[in-house]
Image (cartoon, grey):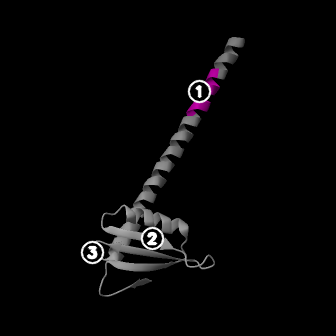
Amino acid sequence: MEHGSYSDLSKSTFSLVDEDHTFANSVRFTLNQDPRVTFCGYSIPHPSENRVNVRVQTTGDPASEVLKDGCQDLMLMCQHVRSTFGKAVNDFKTSKSVRSTSEKSVSESDDDMDT
């Protein structure tokens, strides 16, 4: 839900339900990287409420569009981290299986030398 004025679309507060510090701080960080943003912050009204308020003020662009762009940028960052991590895990598993295979062949050749 957006709380703002119809006269100045560059300043709005957005209430996001079922979100917490994890999402709010990530979106705040992303929005503060945007040169169109003059202020971005968030608050959680009460610890027992599962809601976060995100305040966005821009240089003139509609705050709702800037928030949408920030969420899309955050999604792209998350996809990049996920694919990079997945690749690193696969590389590790591959190198581990290559290492264990080469260790087996070394131990087999050591066994052959013992006989």
Q: Is residue 68 visible?
A: no
Quarter residue 96 falls in? top right
Residue, disc 1 = 102
For this view, does 78 lie left or right of residue 61? right
Extent of the magenta region: 98-106
- Tell me if residue 102 comes above or below residue 21 in the rendering: above
Kind of residue at badge 3? Gly
| Picture residue at 38% right of the left edge, 72% below the top | 67
Which label sits in the foreground, 1 or 2?
2
Give x and y (percent) for residue 1.
45, 83
Q: Are marks 1 and 2 in contact (CB under 8 Å)?
A: no
| First reached walking from the N terminus: tag 3 or tag 1 | 3
| Picture residue at 35% right of the left edge, 78% below the top | 11
Q: CA distance from mark 3 to mark 1?
A: 62 Å
> SS for tag 2?
strand
Q: Is residue 67 visible?
A: yes
For this view, does 30 lie left or right of residue 60? right
> SS for tag 1?
helix
Quarter residue 108 falls in? top right
Residue, disc 2 = 41
For this view, does 114 lie left or right of residue 8? right
| First reached walking from the N terminus: tag 1 or tag 2 | 2
Binning the other alpha carbons within 10 Å of mark 3 as few (below 14), some (14 to 19) or many (20 upward) gives few
Binning the other alpha carbons within 10 Å of mark 1 as few (below 14), some (14 to 19) or many (20 upward) gives few
| Picture residue at 45% right of the left edge, 59% below the top | 78
Residue, disc 3 = 60
